[in-house]
Amino acid sequence: MKNIKIASTLIAALMLTAVVGCASTQKQESTGQYVDDSVITTAVKAAILKEPSLKVSEINVETFKGAVQLSGFVRSQDNIATAMNVTRGVNGVKSVKNDMRLK
């Protein structure tokens, strides 16, 4: 009976360690959030690619916990506004930060 209690305690400790190790913090994503952010980043890049007035090669997209940051150098203020609007329309985007600059 004593061995069962020890084994149960060790298994519980191992499971708790695994759960805590995969949890997110303010500065670090969990594994699931990382995957979700990768999907959002890909969807934003695809949406920008579909927009004829934008060049996907000019705009960098980074996502952290659903917050998308756009950066790079674009040709006009209209391109910045279009990229922001396209990004806001992507499913899963919680907020958009603009760090794009004019050429």
Image (cartoon, grey):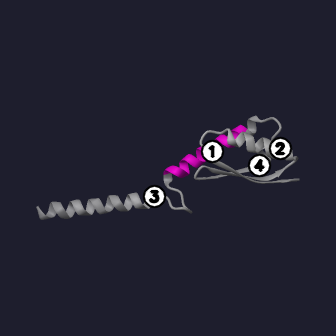
The part of the chain drawn in magenta is 32-47
Q: Nearer the viewer, mark 1 or mark 3?
A: 1
Q: Which residue is mark 2?
A: 79
Q: Earlier in the sequence, mark 1 or mark 3?
A: 3
Q: Quadrant of the N terminus?
A: bottom left
Q: Which residue is mark 1?
A: 93
Q: Which residue is mark 3?
A: 23
Q: Which residue is mark 4?
A: 59
Q: Residues within 10 Å of mark 4 (few under 14, many from 20)?
A: many
Q: Residues within 10 Å of mark 1 (few under 14, many from 20)?
A: many
Q: Earlier in the sequence, mark 4 or mark 3?
A: 3
Q: Residue at x 81, y 41 (%)?
A: 54
Q: Nearer the viewer, mark 1 or mark 4?
A: 1
Label 1 vs label 4: CA separation?
Answer: 17 Å
Q: Earlier in the sequence, mark 2 or mark 3?
A: 3
Q: Amino acid at mark 2?
A: Asn
Residue 12 screen position, x and y as percent: 28, 59
